[in-house]
Image (cartoon, rainbow, N blue to C red):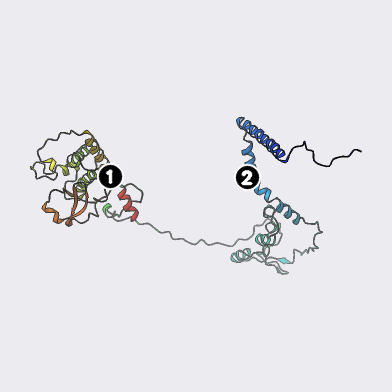
Amino acid sequence: MLTRSIDRDPYGLTIEEKIFYGAKRLCIVFAVAAVALSTLDLMNIRSVEAAADFIHVNGQRFAGLPDLVRTGIKSIALDLPPPPSATAMIPRDIITLTSLPARDITAAARVKTDVSPIAELAAARHLDAVEFAMEQPSALMTSATPIAVTPSTEMPAQSMILASADPAPLPLPEITPTPVSLPVSLPMSEAIPLDMVPLPPPAPGVPPPSPAQRLHLEGKERAKAERCLANAIYFEARSEPVRGQMAVAQVVINRAFSGFYPNDVCGVVYQNASRHLACQFTFACDGKSKAIHERGEWARANRIAKQTLDGQVYVPEVGKSTHYHAVYVHPNWVREMHKNARFGIHNFYRPYAWGNGAGEPVWGTAALAQNKKK
């Protein structure tokens, strides 16, 4: 007797093998898709980007499609017979239109009807806004203007006949022009001096004039001033830190702007240079050789001098200082000075009697910061 086994095939695939083969087929499908997309990219066919752009552009349209269908179904109107209406014909001979004044006609034309586009839009909230906007409103198709009608058996001399085809022009109200007085500008008796005209403060962010621009240094004068300032930096502070050398250059420029010294760089540096050890800067009258042996320090001094004249270097701690001395000397004028800062072996001062120098110019980023504070 033959029987059929209902047990599973002992030689069939196990669950683990089925999962493995399924994953293998899936990987093959992804690999084929990747090769196809790479081939399309090499052929300059951006299929993925085009599909993404299409979905992005039409996403909102697809999302609003059910609402659009629902709105279209609700907006379907049945064809109904027109409502009953009656037309009345009034004889022309017994109707006259009295002429209204211009102000009455204007006031009557401003009367609004009960049915307006806004009212129709509010009443049609359930309709689609785009479809409602495409329809031509009935309120704009017909204009209702109130007309004063007075029945009379006699025709006045100056009257308007409704629906008249007479070629005679209608009487218009007379308009009397009103004289308008225009202001007359009188010439100025005397020009305002330029010094009395207040100038606005510089806007924040606008670079202020550099020391070279304020001192009108150009060409040979600029080269001469730059050389004098480099000499002062080199012979006074070449062994000092960079900020100490910048501070010496700033003192020279502050003296040129102070009004108590010559208003040019070389005049400040070599003031009283003919007096032995009685000048403003010791190197200018000490009688020693001025040969330059340290090329690196000389190049740095020239660079600091150029940047100072260009307004790129300003030490806020030094501020408006006009004097300095080495820490190993004790001059008598220190008691009349306000100490501002110290860099290296130099202390920097400004006389009490000269104030804080608020009216003197500031250059570089410090000037921009002051303008922003104002």
Residue 56: mark in rendering: 2
| Picture residue at 26% right of the left edge, 53% below the top | 195
| Callout 1 crowding tier (Cα within 10 Å): few <14, some 14–19, many ≥20 | many
C-alpha span from label 2 to label 1:
55 Å
Q: Is residue 367 left or right of residue 23?
A: left
**Can you give x and y, in whole percent of width and height, for residue 236 in the image?**
17, 42
Q: Amino acid at mark 2?
A: His
Mark 1: amino acid? Val
Above-or-below relation of 209 to 113: above
Q: Quadrant of the C terminus?
A: bottom left
Q: Residues within 10 Å of mark 2 (few under 14, many from 20)?
A: few
SS class of the residue under badge 2? helix
Image position, residue 339 (x, y; %): 19, 54
Q: Is residue 201 visible?
A: no
Q: Nearer the viewer, residue 340 or 126?
A: 340
Q: Secondary structure at mark 1?
A: loop
Q: Which residue is mark 1?
A: 313
Location of residue 191 in the rendering, given as x and y in whole percent from the top left corner: 29, 53
Work out whether residue 154 can be spotted: yes
Residue at (75, 65) in percent of width and height: 93
| Viewer-side residue, 97 vs 135 | 135
The quarter holding residue 21 reads top right
- Could you tell whether 133 is left or right of 306 in the image? right
Task: Name the N-terminal-most of marks 2 and 1.
Answer: 2
Q: Give the farthest residue toward the right.
A: 1
Image: 337 above or below 43: below
What is the number of callouts on the image? 2
* Quarter of the image with the N terminus in it: top right
- On screen, residue 186 versus residue 99, left or right, reads left
Q: State the image coordinates of residue 357 (x, y, percent, origin top left).
A: 22, 54
Residue at 68% across, 36% down? 24
- The image's mark for residue 218 is none
